[in-house]
Image (cartoon, rainbow, N blue to C red):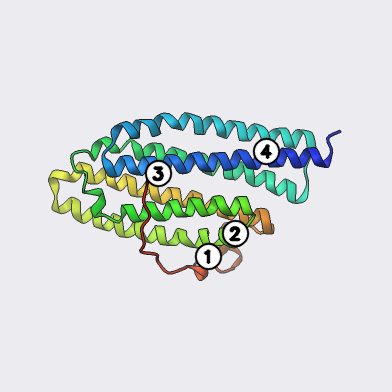
């Protein structure tokens, strides 16, 4: 019968696979945004092709979770870890899908490379990627406080999405000849907003894994939302290189 040491080894292997998934998705995100900002269709095609590796890794992680369940029948903290690993794995895979979709917009922006840079989209991308990286670190370090900061940052990205949507609608009304390009920028904004949502989901899973507290739908029980801990909007920018 498998012993505790064997279970610990299996869990370490699982955490390593999830860390690998996080790194691959982060690279996909950086390449997708560079493809958009630079109008680089070749790089965009690489991101689209790279999504298959993300999908394959998702299956491998799920198989590892099934193996642990079958061999060890974990309980308590170990069971929470396993349940959250499945959820986190799915969220990372969904982020990979959005990176692929971001890249598919690159060919439509080649005729107006500066248009995206004139919007809040680069800032949205910076913040979403920061959330993704902080969620990864929170997972690796079992850090519930870092996870809670990620949850709070999602409200900032939502605000930027609303501002960007209004800005793009105004641009579309004023610049009819670029309406199609602007429509693709709207899909970029929505994809970035969804990436931040998945990063928030990952952070919520980490809080549950560490604390045993489910932060989803907190308004149902009357508890305060994460907005109480919302940090001020960071106007600095990071590079997608």
Identity of the residue furthest to the right in this view: 1
Q: Residue at x 72, y 38 (%)?
A: 10
> Are discs 1 and 2 less than 8 Å apart at CB?
yes
Residue 42 found in image quarter: top left
Which of the two labelled residues, at mark 1 and mark 4, occupies the earlier sequence position? 4
Estimate how packed mark 2 is, as few (under 14), some (14 to 19) or many (20 or more) residues with alpha carbons within 10 Å.
Answer: some
SS class of the residue under badge 3?
helix
Of badges 3 and 1, nearer the viewer stands 3
Mark 1–mark 2 distance (CA, rounded to whole Å): 9 Å
At horizontal 67% and vertical 56% (from top left) the residue drawn is 210
- Dot 1 alpha-carbon crowd within 10 angstroms: few under 14, some 14 to 19, many 20 or more: some
Q: Give the residue pinned by disc 1.
A: 226
Q: Which residue is mark 3?
A: 30
User: Looking at the image, can residue 25 be seen?
Assistant: yes
- Measured from the top left, where is residue 97 in percent x and y? 44, 38
Disc number lying in front (4 or 2): 4
Query: Vertically, is 64 above or below 78?
Result: above
Where disc 2 sits, the SS reads loop
- How far, Cα to Cα, is label 4 from label 2? 27 Å
Between marks 3 and 4, how big is the CA–CA gap? 26 Å
In the image, what residue occupies the spot 27% across and 58% down?
166
* Secondary structure found at label 1: helix
Give 129 or 179, whichever is nearer the viewer: 129
């Amino acid at each position: 019968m498998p012993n505790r040491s064997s279970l610990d080894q299996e869990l370490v292997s699982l955490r390593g696979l999830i860390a690998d998934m996080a790194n691959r998705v982060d690279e996909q995100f950086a390449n997708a945004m560079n493809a958009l900002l630079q109008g680089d269709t070749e790089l965009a095609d690489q991101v689209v092709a790279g999504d298959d590796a993300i999908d394959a890794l998702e299956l491998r992680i799920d198989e590892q979770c099934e193996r642990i369940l079958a061999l060890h029948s974990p309980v308590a903290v170990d069971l929470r870890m396993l349940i959250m690993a499945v959820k986190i794995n799915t969220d990372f895979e969904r982020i990979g899908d959005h990176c692929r979709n971001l890249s598919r917009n690159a060919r439509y922006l080649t005729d107006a490379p500066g248009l995206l840079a004139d919007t809040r989209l680069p800032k949205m991308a910076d913040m979403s990627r920061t959330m993704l990286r902080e969620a990864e670190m929170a997972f690796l370090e079992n850090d519930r406080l870092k996870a809670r900061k990620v949850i709070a940052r999602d409200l900032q990205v939502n605000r930027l999405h609303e501002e960007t949507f209004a800005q793009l609608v105004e641009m579309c009304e004023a610049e009819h000849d670029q309406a199609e390009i602007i429509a693709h920028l709207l899909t970029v904004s929505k994809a970035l907003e969804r990436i931040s949502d998945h990063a928030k989901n990952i952070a919520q899973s980490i809080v549950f894994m560490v604390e045993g507290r489910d932060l989803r739908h907190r308004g149902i029980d009357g508890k305060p939302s994460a907005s109480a801990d919302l940090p001020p909007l960071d106007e600095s920018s990071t590079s997608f290189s």
